[in-house]
Amino acid sequence: MSVKFPSELGHRATVLVTDKLLIHNISTGATEYTTVAELLAAFGIAIDAAFTGIGIAAALARLHTYAAGTNEFRVESGGGSSVVRFIVANDFDTYIQWNSGTTAGDFLFYDTRTGVIRARIDRLGRVCIGSVAPTSALQVPGLPVYANNAAAVGGGLTAGAFYRTNADPDPVCVVH
């Protein structure tokens, strides 16, 4: 069974839908047959049972985008208070979220199992790990307290880890 209907081109072309698409341009007289997959491929889109590729013929993930010669990947939301989320559904149940609206420009790193924001990069470039409201360029509340480097190593910290001494002044130290 086939259905014939006018296309978006008005009366200059008609489209006949069968197992393939029949595209007939009345102005030029050209008639082409193509499958939906071939038509999408002409626009750089490939869809199979499991994956969708945009700009790539053989997608390697549920959504795989590729643009040769460009260094930009854009996900855009046009609402007034938009949220764009990159969700990783794995054993860790985490996602990265970019906000507009009241927290415009903030990147949030969520733990969805606990509902806790683990880190934030605010629109001013301030980074906070372990809290939700950075007040300086780098803020890491909750550092462990050890008297010295040997105690920190004995407590299980490895080289490069941060700790406090809880003295006055209270320096932030790096395990070496």
Image (cartoon, rainbow, N blue to C red):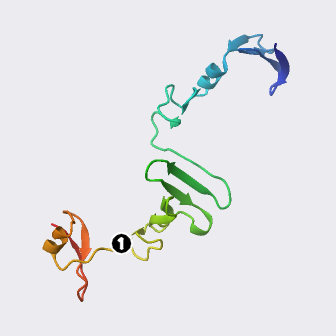
Which quarter of the image is occupied by the N terminus? Answer: top right
Residue located at (57% from left, 54% from top): 84
The quadrant in which residue 152 appears is: bottom left
Q: Is residue 41 left or right of residue 176?
A: right
Above or below, 39 relative to 133: above
Above or below, 27 relative to 118: above
Q: Is residue 91 left or right of residue 142?
A: right
Q: Is residue 11 visible?
A: no
**Mark 1, other Cα within 10 Å: few <14 / some 14–19 / many ≥20:** some
Residue type (three-letter) at the residue carrying disc 1: Val
Q: In the image, residue 53 lies at what x, y percent?
A: 54, 31
Residue located at (15% from left, 66% from top): 176
Q: In the image, residue 168 lies at what x, y percent?
A: 24, 89
Residue located at (43% from left, 50% from top): 91
Q: Residue furthest bottom?
A: 168
Q: Is residue 61 left or right of residue 11?
A: left
Above or below, 21 relative to 130: above
Residue located at (49% from left, 55% from top): 96
Q: In the image, residue 21 lies at what x, y percent?
A: 72, 16
Q: In the image, residue 139 lies at what x, y percent?
A: 37, 73
Residue nearer the viewer, 37 or 159 = 159
Q: Which residue is mark 1?
A: 140
Count numbered badges in the picture. Answer: 1
The quadrant in which residue 118 appears is: bottom left
Residue nearer the viewer, 45 or 89 = 89
Q: Is residue 95 visible?
A: yes
Kindly state the secondary structure of the residue where label 1 is placed.
Answer: loop
